[in-house]
């Protein structure tokens, strides 16, 4: 019996040893797979960046056949990296791949694998489906799938960086800076311009586009080709929606493997209620943007189809789409000579000015308000459904309109009404002289809407009365709503400081509006934004006057306000500025779009209060 027991113990020890051996081997293999996945992740990210840059070179330059073969060879190398990444994850990391990959990411991955078909199977002489064979064996399909995969991969990489608890403000600033530099090189490509462009002018226009300002040191219609206008539209759309919104949309929509921290950043950025609502909210923002821009393009085309008769139908469609996008994004760029001040438009029925005013207001309302409108609509639908079913609505919210929505909308309506009356009154016998009463009303509406950020100009501000100019400067300073495509300090900030002023005058201890108390943090931030805007504006004006002693102070004050508050209107002096002045305005546009406070937070980081309670004392303020 002892011999049998001893034998069984030996067998048991060997089995346990084998199990432990295979456990260690499996653990080592899993670690090895994880390490290889990490290396492939980095290699694929850099290959994606190279793919985008190579695609720019492919589209923007004329190539000899030999050079074109070299470029396609590099694309094949990038294709090999992408395919290797996909196959490795499918073969050795299948569980994590199935868990983290969404449906559309599967479509992109499978399409990438389809690009191997021309390599593995020669082009058939008699294909079953000629159109499918033409698609799969074409360079357009090959390059389109490569670019789509690269965009998804770069977006996912940025989300991974966000998940490393990097400062969100710093990421936001760097992302805008990256697209500005990328756009400046794209606009310099030979196929984007008719006669070439200096790099400083290209950098100026790219900054103005990404920061949705509209200031330009060159003439847009005579400088940029249709491809250049397409690049400009891409930069405007990217800057308006926000670089992080774009990347977050792709990363979250294509992959589920995102850290909670990165999703919380996106949640705070788009002001949605929960992490579960991220994708629906991002999709809603994108669809709303596309719908408004598409509808705006249709209405603009309808208003100019019998006006711009010297344009072909294709040119009219390009004009309509570009101006709709520029208006919604509050960018103010125009591909028409003299822009919205073109005599043909000015002598029309003026309907285009009303259409662009509506599109501009839609863009300046702010995405948090649009999200709140969606929630309100869904709440009313649920109430109506419960009423039909004869049931009581459970969990009915007390306030369906947020405080931010009410304050922003009321302030916007008041400013809009006052500005129309003021412009109509001040300029009735000045810049509006000679117009009919209807045209004066339309131009008052248009010129009261555009100074708040869009920058379109139908009547040159150089001819405004001084009192009108001061009022326009105030509108430029205020801007549109927070988290919108508009600039300025934002109507939310302006309303907060006025409500706070009212509370101080009345001797109230709390700042309230619409039966709700505004947080101390919001009031402090509003005061900080106003203070920094005044100080930075003063500094920019002083520097401009130092750099440009030959230009009038009136025009320089207006130019500085237009750049810092991302408006885009000008007295026409932008092309006359020296290099130092252009660089100063580039910095001003960047600060105006990113936000001075956000930039400072990104540089310094959030520093917590010291764990020491200092005694409280008062300053004499009077």
Image (spheres, rainbow, N blue to C red):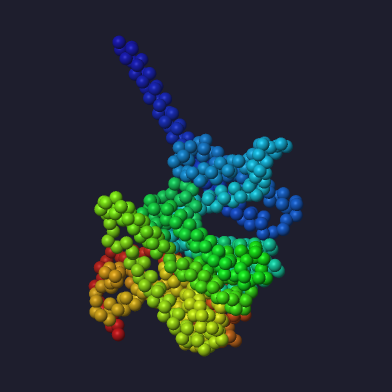
**How far across and down, in percent of the image, does residue 593 sit?**
48, 69
User: Is residue 184 or residue 345 the one in the foreground?
Assistant: 345
Q: Is residue 579 visible?
A: no
User: Where, quadrant-wise, is the N terminus in this rendering?
Assistant: top left
**How far across and down, in percent of the image, does residue 283 sit?**
46, 54
User: Is residue 556 or residue 286 the one in the foreground?
Assistant: 286
Is 37 on the left or on the right of 338, as rendered? Answer: left
Is 578 on the left or on the right of 106, as rendered? Answer: right
Residue occupying image coordinates x 48% and y 37%: 94
Is 198 on the left or on the right of 428, as rendered? Answer: right
User: Is residue 50 or residue 210 the one in the foreground?
Assistant: 210
**How far across and down, in percent of the image, does residue 152 sit?**
53, 50
Residue farthest right in this picture: 65
Residue occupying image coordinates x 38% and y 25%: 16
Residue occupying image coordinates x 66% and y 57%: 59
User: Where, quadrant-wise, is the C terminus in this rendering?
Assistant: bottom left
Is 12 on the left or on the right of 30, as rendered? Answer: left
Q: Is residue 96 visible?
A: yes
Quadrant in the picture for residue 506: bottom left
Answer above or below: position of 250 versus 194. Answer: above
Answer above or below: position of 528 versus 130. Answer: below
**How far across and down, in percent of the image, does residue 359 sit?**
50, 68
User: Is residue 410 or residue 52 the one in the foreground?
Assistant: 410
How many numbered badges does the structure rendering display?
0
Residue occupying image coordinates x 37% and y 61%: 372
Residue farthest top in this picture: 1
């Amino acid at each position: 019996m002892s011999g049998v027991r001893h034998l069984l113990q030996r067998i048991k020890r060997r089995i346990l040893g084998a199990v432990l051996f295979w456990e260690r081997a499996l653990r080592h293999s899993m670690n090895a797979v994880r390490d290889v996945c990490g290396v492939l992740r980095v290699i694929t990210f850099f290959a994606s960046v190279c793919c985008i840059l190579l695609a720019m070179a492919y589209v923007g330059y004329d190539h000899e056949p030999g050079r074109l073969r070299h470029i396609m060879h590099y694309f094949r190398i990038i294709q090999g990296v992408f395919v290797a990444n996909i196959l490795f994850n499918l073969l050795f990391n299948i569980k994590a791949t199935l868990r983290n990959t969404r449906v559309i990411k599967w479509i992109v991955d499978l399409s990438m694998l389809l690009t191997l078909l021309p390599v593995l199977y020669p082009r058939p002489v008699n294909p079953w489906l000629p159109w499918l064979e033409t698609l799969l064996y074409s360079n357009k399909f090959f390059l389109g799938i490569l670019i789509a995969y690269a965009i998804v991969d770069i977006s996912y990489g940025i989300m991974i960086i966000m998940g490393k608890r990097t400062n969100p403000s710093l990421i936001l600033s760097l992302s805008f800076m990256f697209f500005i530099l990328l756009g400046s090189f794209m606009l310099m490509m030979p196929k984007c311009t008719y006669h070439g462009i200096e790099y400083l002018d290209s950098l100026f226009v790219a900054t103005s586009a990404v920061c949705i300002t509209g200031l330009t040191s060159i003439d847009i219609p005579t400088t940029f080709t249709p491809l250049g206008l397409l690049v400009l539209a891409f930069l405007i759309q990217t800057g308006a929606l926000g670089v992080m919104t774009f990347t977050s949309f792709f990363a979250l929509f294509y992959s589920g493997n995102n850290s909670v921290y990165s999703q919380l950043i996106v949640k705070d950025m788009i002001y949605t209620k929960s992490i579960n609502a991220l994708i629906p909210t991002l999709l809603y923002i994108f669809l709303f943007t596309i719908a408004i821009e598409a509808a705006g393009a249709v209405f603009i085309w309808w208003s100019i189809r019998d006006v711009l008769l010297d344009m072909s139908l294709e040119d009219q469609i390009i004009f309509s789409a570009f101006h709709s996008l520029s208006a919604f994004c509050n960018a103010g760029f125009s591909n028409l000579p003299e822009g919205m001040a073109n005599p043909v438009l000015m002598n029309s029925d003026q309907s285009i000015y009303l259409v662009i005013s509506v599109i501009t207001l839609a863009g300046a309302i702010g995405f948090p308000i649009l999200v709140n409108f969606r929630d309100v609509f869904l709440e009313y639908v649920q109430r109506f459904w419960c009423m039909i079913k004869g049931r009581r609505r459970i969990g009915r919210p007390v306030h369906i309109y947020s405080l931010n929505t009410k304050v922003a909308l009321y302030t916007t309506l008041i400013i809009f009404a006052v500005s129309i009356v003021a412009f109509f009154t001040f300029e009735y016998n000045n810049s509006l002289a000679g117009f009919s009463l209807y045209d004066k009303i339309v131009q008052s509406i248009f010129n009261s809407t555009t100074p708040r950020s869009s920058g379109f100009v139908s009547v040159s501000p150089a001819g405004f009365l001084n009192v009108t100019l001061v009022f326009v400067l105030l509108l430029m300073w205020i801007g549109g709503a927070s988290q919108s495509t508009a600039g300025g300090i934002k109507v939310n900030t302006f309303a907060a400081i006025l409500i706070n002023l009212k509370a101080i005058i009345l001797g109230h201890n709390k700042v309230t509006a619409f039966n709700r108390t505004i947080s101390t943090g919001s009031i402090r931030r509003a005061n900080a934004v106003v203070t920094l805007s005044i100080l930075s504006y003063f500094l920019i004006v002083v520097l401009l006057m130092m750099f440009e002693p030959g230009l009038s102070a009136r025009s320089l004050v207006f130019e500085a306000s237009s750049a810092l508050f991302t408006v885009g209107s000008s007295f026409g002096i932008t092309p006359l500025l020296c290099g130092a002045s252009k660089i100063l305005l580039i910095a001003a546009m960047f600060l105006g779009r990113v936000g001075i406070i956000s930039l400072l937070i990104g540089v310094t980081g959030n520093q917590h209060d010291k764990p020491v309670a200092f005694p409280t004392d008062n300053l004499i303020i009077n």
